Image (cartoon, rainbow, N blue to C red):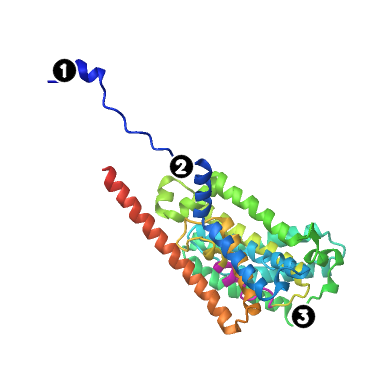
Amino acid sequence: MTSTAQLTRDPAPLPPATPGPNPVARAIAAVFKRRETSIIIAILVVIAAATIVNDQFLVSKDGFRNLLLNPSIYILLSVGVAMVIITRSVDLSVSSTLGLTAYLTGRLFIDFPGIPIVAVFIAGIIAGGLLGLVNGALVAYARVPAMVITLGTMYAYRGINVAWAGSNRINPQDMPKEFTSLGTAQILSIPVLTIIAVVVVILLAWYMKNTRGGREFYALGSDPEAAQLYGLNVVKRNLIAFVLCGALAGLAGVLYAARYGTIDSAAGYGVELTAIGGAVIGGVAISGGVGTLWGAAFGAILLLTIKSALPVLGVQDFWQQAVVGVLIIGAIVLDRVLALRQHKKLITTKGASS
């Protein structure tokens, strides 16, 4: 019979410790699990395929510049829309906001000769923010779904633009050369418009990740009722999301004027679908509460890169639209599958711990 003293003297041997995974391996695994990594890989694959068919797609000076320059305006729009979608809303009026602020940009240079370029940038951002405020106020106080409100303001803002611009068109020579040259200017071979878009994304991504206000966007989108019970100011968060989205669309309108120079009442027509598509492809869940602004930015880059690459690959116009549509549907289905797997995993973990 074993005595108590023997048990004290001869404890059961512990199982050999299993060495944990290497920290570097864990870091690499974490990087490859991120949605942004898969999007970047997809962008590189598309660029490689198009370059194999036609090396001018990347290797030429204009090819490299266009790859960076073309998505710049869409990055701003997708990031703005992503902030609204994260709060479980949507903004369909960004294209009309872009058109109005682009025309406003041209009119300011015509009606106020000598106006500083910085003042025009500020005016465009404020005008876009005010249009976003109208959207946010209607959604927050009228308690009407954002899709209905912003569908209405999309047509209303476009109607104001048509009534204001009429058949007139603003040409590059109506604006200062210093302003229009921003559309093609480069710093260390990187377009200035791309630098502006990247700086804006960095600032807003930091805000969303590291501030209480940014985290409240996710809380609101995950469960609006719980967020309200917790004491979050839901109306304030909705207003801020729409104002930021409108301000980014306003900035995009100013950059549109600098990039293209020619502005009429149809400026930016239809770009809202590309902006929303970029956000969704980038991992921003259409049901709210999930996604990053970096993902939205990379999603916009992927969409614009595919649109540029498909003609090079010999894909006809009809199939180009179909490919983009399939890509968006695939992103939504992937998000749904991942959400269901995560939900199932949580239930399994909870059952095992109880």
Q: Which of marks 2 and 1 is nearer the N terminus?
A: 1
Residue span colored magenta: 266-277
- Counting from the top left corner in percent of width and height, residue 256 is at 72, 68
Residue holding disc 3: 168
Q: Does the magenta stretch include residue 267?
A: yes
Is residue 133 visible to us here? Answer: no
Q: Which of 101 and 159 is in front in this view?
A: 101
Image quarter of residue 73 = bottom right
Decide: marks 2, 1 in contact (CB < 8 A)? Answer: no
Amino acid, disc 2: Pro
Q: Which of marks 2 and 3 is nearer the N terminus?
A: 2
- Counting from the top left corner in percent of width and height, residue 305 is at 63, 69
Q: Residue at x 72, y 76 (%)?
A: 164
Q: Which residue is drawn at 49% across and 45% down?
A: 26
Label 1 CA crowd tier, 10 Å (few <14, some 14–19, many 20+): few
Q: Does the magenta stretch include residue 66?
A: no
Q: Residue 21 carries which label?
A: 2
What kind of element bears circle 2? loop
